[in-house]
Image: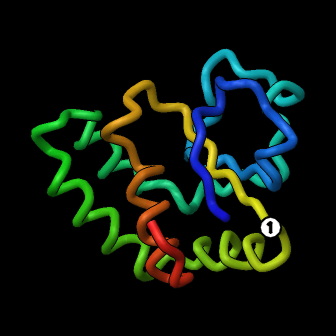
Amino acid sequence: MIKIKRIYEPASKEDGFRILIDRLWPRGMKKETAAIQLWLKDVAPSASLRKWFDHQPQKWEVFKKSYLEELASNKAVKEIITAHESHPVVTLLYAAHDMQYNHALVLDGFLRRELGLAD
């Protein structure tokens, strides 16, 4: 099972293996509180794509397409797939305030297609 969650929400046992998928460390978050097992900076969108998108809903479709293209050749994706094979639950953690337009949603959909999981 793959889940997504804001890193600012409290960690729980139900999260399983916790992976931070942001390129930058979340503001105000202490490493002890984050309770992550893996920080995969390289699976996040490129800095230029992230800055261009800036969580603007009108740019969402172009952002999704561009980020999916980046993910198709991103070697860090394999680390999440490996974690999924070893752990019954993997939670992808992100810091964005916008829960409707963020890279975690795109990555989650990409992984589900790669792993043949139902949405």
Residue at image location 72% in from the left, 59% down from the top: 90
Residue 5 x %, y %: 59, 39
Residue 44 x %, y %: 50, 55
Task: Report whether 98 appears left or right of 94.
Answer: left
Front position in the image: 29 or 109: 109
Secondary structure type for disc 1: loop
Above or below for 14 versus 28: below
Front position in the image: 24 or 72: 72
Q: Looking at the picture, which amino acid does disc 1 mark?
A: Pro
Residue at image location 49% in from the left, 82% down from the top: 114
Q: How is the image coloured?
A: rainbow
Circle 1 crowding by C-alpha within 10 Å: few under 14, some 14–19, many from 20: few
Q: Residue furthest front?
A: 118
In the picture, which quadrant includes the N terminus?
Answer: bottom right
- For label 1, the residue is 88
Task: Report whether 36 appears left or right of 57.
Answer: right
Q: Which quarter of the figure has residue 8? A: top right
Front position in the image: 99 or 80: 99
Residue 68 x %, y %: 33, 69
